[in-house]
Structures are given as structure tokens and as C-alpha cells.
Amino acid sequence: MSAEASVGSHAADSAQSASSQPAFHNSDELRNRGLLGSKYVKLNVGGSLHYTTVQTLSKEDSLLRSICNGGTEVSIDSEGWVILDRCGRHFGLVLNFLRDGSVPLPEDHKELDEVLKEAQYYRVQGLSQLCISAMQKQKDVFETVCRIPMITSAKEEQKIMASCRKPVVKLQNNRGNNKYSYTSNSDDNLLKNIELFDKLVLRFNGRVLFVKDVLGDEICCWSFYGEGRKIAEVCCTSIVYATEKKQTKVEFPEARIFEETLNILIYENGRGSGPGGLHLLDARGSGASLDEEGATGGERRVRRIHVRRHIMHDERGPGQQTVYKD
């Protein structure tokens, strides 16, 4: 074989070899190629750099698998980094889930929600279900905890009552708001009112919102709200004209308070505005004085129940009592 023939044959082989290899002359051709034939992948996720394998990214039928097999176009820079326009804060967690099949999730609800959004974007169904289950567990735990808001201002109270869709029971407890001395049983009755409040919170947790007010004008007063307005009020304090001085007496009308709490359940889920709702709340007690705010037209009235308001009473034994009038 001559030298010219040998050179010609070699040139022909080189041309055939060059025609069999794909040539990428611009970034568009590189983008369309995907990651076919690659074993390792370099990912730039919002400036966070990650190095992994195609096998890891392809474990679930996700957006990452679609990127690897060329089903989704991606941008690849001159150094071979796949550019993903996402925040890279939680991408390492996504990769660890693909590697191991499970991963510890953050306990903070906000961060957990961020992980869920990333899992949904990358279509990693296993991680999405894991996040949803964790959020449901957090919700169940939160609902079993009794949280009692403490009112700090009248404006805050109005906002709570107007925005809450549940019935509301408020206990106003301000022992220091008294210019007279207390009767001998008042402190015990005040504690009984507070204990009853705690018991009702545990019993109706999740159905009724219970709030406390320690800044109001009343010493001990229960208020019951439905659909954003006051329905009833039970005042537990009275002025007693005892020997040589006035005293403040705190009562404990347990039956009346419990009755009004049950009545307020009529307004649960908006049922109080339905047919017959108002008639069911027209309860009267024989042991208390009842005042109703005047109403005109279609306005609804507020039942105000005062237990022994301004009475003359001395708690000393028979034969030792002395009654003075103003």
C-alpha cells in the first residue's frame, strides 16, 4: 500500500469517527442534551452547590429524574453545573431523602412548610407525604393543648370577639379592684370561680374559646359571647351592708355559670342564628335578678344576671347580726 493511500484511509476514518460523535457548539445544544450518559451530577441550586449521582436523582419519579433522562430542559454552565433557580436551603434534605428513603424533619412549623413546598416542586412524593404526616401530627398535638388568651386591652378584646368563630367565655377577675373589704367567704368563692373556669376549659376545649381579663372593672364577672356579640353576663359580686361598714361579697353561682356555658354552645358552628336558636337561650333562674338591655327594632338583648346585687346581709350567726342602711 502506498503512503498516499494510507493517509487517505486514515482521513476517512477520522471523518467517520467525527460524524458519529455529537458536537455541541452552543449552550442550547448542551441544554437539550440533558444528563444522558453521565454518572455524576453537579447541581447549583440558588448558589448552593451539590454533588451527587444520576442514580440518586432517579430513585423517584420526580422532576429530578426527568432532568436526568432529558425529559426536562435545564441550563448547564460552561463548567458543567446544572443551574436550578430555587432556594438551596433545604435541597440537601431532599437529596438525603432520595439517598436513604427517610430523613429527620425540622420541628418548626414554618421550616416544615418550606420543606413541603420544595418536595412538591421537585415532585418527590415520598418526602411530600412525610411532611404532610408530620404537619398533621403537629396539628393534633396543638389542638390537645389548652391555650387561654389573656386580654391586655379593650381593643384587643373587641378584635378577639369579632374574629373568633367559636363561642367565647370570658372570666373577668380583678381582685384588687375593690374599695371595700371582702366578706369572710369571698376569697374562697373567688378561687372556686377560677377553678370552675379551669374545669370548663378542659371540658370544652376545642369547642369554646376561653379568655381571661384581669384589667377590667369587675371583681368577678363571667361574659358569654356568640357570633361576635355578648349573649349573657353573670356578675358574681355584690355590696353587703355589714356592721359599721360596707363589704364586697363574691358569690359562686356554679349552676348558673354552667348553664350559660351550655347555652352558648347553641352558637357553635353558627347554629345560634338558625331557627329556634334564640328561643333555646331564653332561660331564667329563680335565684338571681335578671336585667336586660333595652332593644329596639331587630336588635338582640343581652341577659345580665346579677347575684344578690346591693343586699343587706351580715354573715355573723343568728342573734349577733346588726343591719345598717345607707
Image (spheres, rainbow, N blue to C red):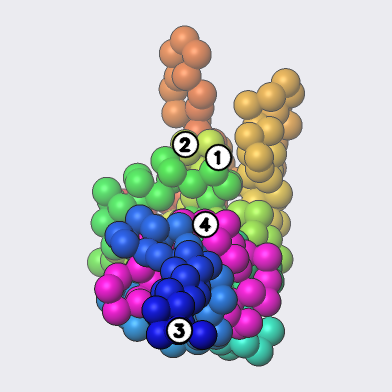
Q: Quick one: SS at disc 2?
A: strand
Q: Earlier in the sequence, mark 2 or mark 3?
A: 3
**Which quadrant holds residue 42?**
bottom left
Q: Nearer the viewer, mark 2 or mark 3?
A: 3
Q: Residue flagged by tag 4: what amino acid is it?
A: Thr
Q: Residue at x 35, y 51 (%)?
A: 157
Determine contact: label 2, label 1, CB under 8 Å.
yes
Q: Which residues are magenta?
A: 54-82
- Residue 226, numbered label: 1
Q: Pointer 4: what residue?
A: 72
Q: Pointer 3: what residue?
A: 2
| C-alpha distance separating marks 1 and 3 | 107 Å
Q: Quick one: SS at disc 3?
A: loop
| C-alpha distance separating marks 1 and 4 | 55 Å
Given residues 208 and 112, the one toward you in this image is 112
Q: Pointer 2: what residue?
A: 229
Q: Residue flagged by tag 3: what amino acid is it?
A: Ser
